[in-house]
């Protein structure tokens, strides 16, 4: 009996299977939030808590599917439930009501409208071919072929995912020595809006394709920044960069392979004056690329949408150093984001 107990004690503990279930359940659980968004659950609760029967009546869906969606939203922290009544959490109120400046819904809309891109079949094809699958495999950077409405929706989604972090990273750096920020591939202009709001010495230029600049001008006007931010139509690969002493890239490097990122880094170095600064803003891997999961998942997102991937701070710092930048720093920013920055001697 003693030997049997001793043998059992020596056996290694078998891990449970929750991580495997997380993969399966995540396939169904996370889309419940997109469905809740599309059905209008969050604005429905804007004025206060509601019971399940009332929610069913207002959304015109039955109790079983409503309960499934509401339970998922509650489990993930977007709703709370008390005595059978559902209400918005602070996260949902802050990010999922269109009236709020930090509204994230445009980004979720983009995911819903392009759901085929994150299907298993599409991601498998992206992995096997090493090519983006969005918009029929043409990718997102075909300005001559992109219709105005498509550009508008995409740029709105970029604003949606950027505007909150845009007001955070400028708090992390001393930009008092700089006068003109060039927001390269600046899309909606969200980061220009955040930077000039913090630093009164700064003006900004949003440099992007013509149809994107049209939408950016609307967001700039919405924030009353027309006197400090302007747009400049151009192609960062082909055109000369407008004069500036601060170059900013947000979620641009992750769209491209290393050789193209190095090209942009060198182009910025050559265009900046001595003392000029480059800032790269993105979701970064840790040094051995064992995580975090957000960076790994972002690389999968890029597989479907672009030629790029997530990078580590070491990789980006090396690009800056190779181009000639010095005083390179890495700092955590808002949420999953970090900034990598350097100065031109």
Image (cartoon, rainbow, N blue to C red):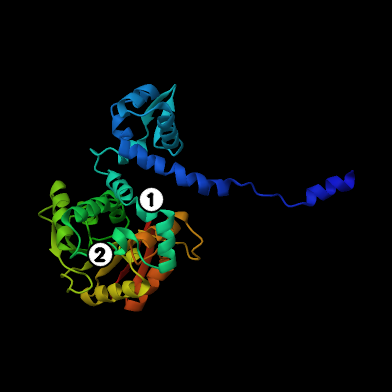
Q: In which quarter of the image is residue 83?
A: top left
Between residues 237 and 164, which one lies in front from this camera angle? 237
Between residues 173 and 265, which one lies in front from this camera angle? 265
In the image, which disc is placed on residue 141?
2
| Mark 1 to mark 2 CA distance (whole Å) | 27 Å
Give residue 163's position: percent from left, percent from top: 26, 50
Q: Depth-wise, is mark 1 or mark 2 nearer the camera?
A: 2
Estimate how packed mark 1 is, as few (under 14), some (14 to 19) or many (20 or more) residues with alpha carbons within 10 Å. few
Asked if 319 appears above or below 149 in the picture, the reply is below
Image point (37%, 72%), residue name: 258
Give residue 306's position: percent from left, percent from top: 33, 63
Estimate how packed mark 2 is, as few (under 14), some (14 to 19) or many (20 or more) residues with alpha carbons within 10 Å. few
Asked if 150 appears above or below 310 in the picture, the reply is above
In the image, which disc is placed on residue 335?
1
| Mark closer to the chain start, 1 or 2 | 2
Asked if 278 appears above or below 198 in the picture, the reply is below
Image point (39%, 24%), residue name: 52
Q: Across the whole image, how many numbered discs are drawn on residues?
A: 2
Q: What element carries label 2?
A: loop
Q: Is mark 1 on a helix, strand or loop?
A: loop
Any part of residue 273 in sight: no
Between residues 88 and 305, which one lies in front from this camera angle? 305
Image point (36%, 69%), residue name: 328
Give residue 136's position: percent from left, percent from top: 30, 60
Between residues 182 and 116, which one lies in front from this camera angle? 116
Q: Which residue lies furthest to the left in this view?
A: 227
């Amino acid at each position: 009996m003693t030997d049997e107990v001793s043998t059992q004690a020596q056996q290694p503990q078998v891990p449970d299977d929750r991580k495997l279930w997380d993969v399966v359940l995540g396939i169904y659980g996370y889309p419940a939030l997109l469905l809740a968004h599309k059905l209008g659950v969050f604005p429905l609760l804007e004025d206060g808590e509601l019971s399940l029967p009332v929610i069913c009546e207002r959304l015109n869906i039955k109790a079983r599917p409503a309960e499934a969606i509401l339970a998922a939203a509650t489990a993930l922290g977007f709703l709370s439930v008390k005595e059978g009544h559902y209400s918005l959490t602070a996260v949902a109120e802050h990010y999922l009501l269109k009236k709020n400046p930090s509204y994230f819904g445009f980004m979720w809309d983009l995911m819903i409208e392009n759901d085929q891109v994150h299907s298993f079949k599409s991601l498998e094809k992206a992995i096997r071919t090493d090519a983006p699958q969005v918009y029929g495999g043409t990718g997102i950077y075909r300005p001559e072929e992109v219709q105005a409405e498509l550009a508008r929706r995409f740029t709105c989604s970029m604003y949606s995912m950027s505007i909150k972090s845009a007001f955070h990273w400028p708090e992390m750096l001393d930009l008092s020595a700089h006068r003109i920020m060039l927001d390269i591939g600046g899309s909606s202009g969200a980061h220009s809006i955040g930077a000039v709001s913090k630093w009164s010495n700064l003006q900004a230029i949003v440099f992007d394709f013509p149809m994107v600049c049209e939408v950016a001008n609307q967001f700039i006007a919405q924030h009353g920044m027309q006197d400090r931010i302007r747009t400049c139509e151009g192609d960062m690969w082909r055109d000369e960069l407008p004069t500036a002493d601060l170059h900013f890239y947000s979620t641009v490097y992750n769209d491209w392979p290393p050789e193209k990122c190095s090209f942009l880094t060198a182009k910025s170095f050559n265009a900046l004056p001595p003392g000029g600064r480059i800032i790269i803003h993105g979701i970064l891997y840790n040094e051995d690329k064992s995580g975090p999961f957000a960076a790994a998942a972002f690389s999968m997102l890029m597989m479907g949408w672009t030629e790029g991937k997530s990078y580590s701070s070491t990789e980006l710092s090396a690009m800056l150093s190779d181009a000639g930048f010095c005083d390179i720093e890495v700092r955590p920013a808002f949420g999953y984001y970090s900034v990598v920055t350097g100065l031109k001697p």
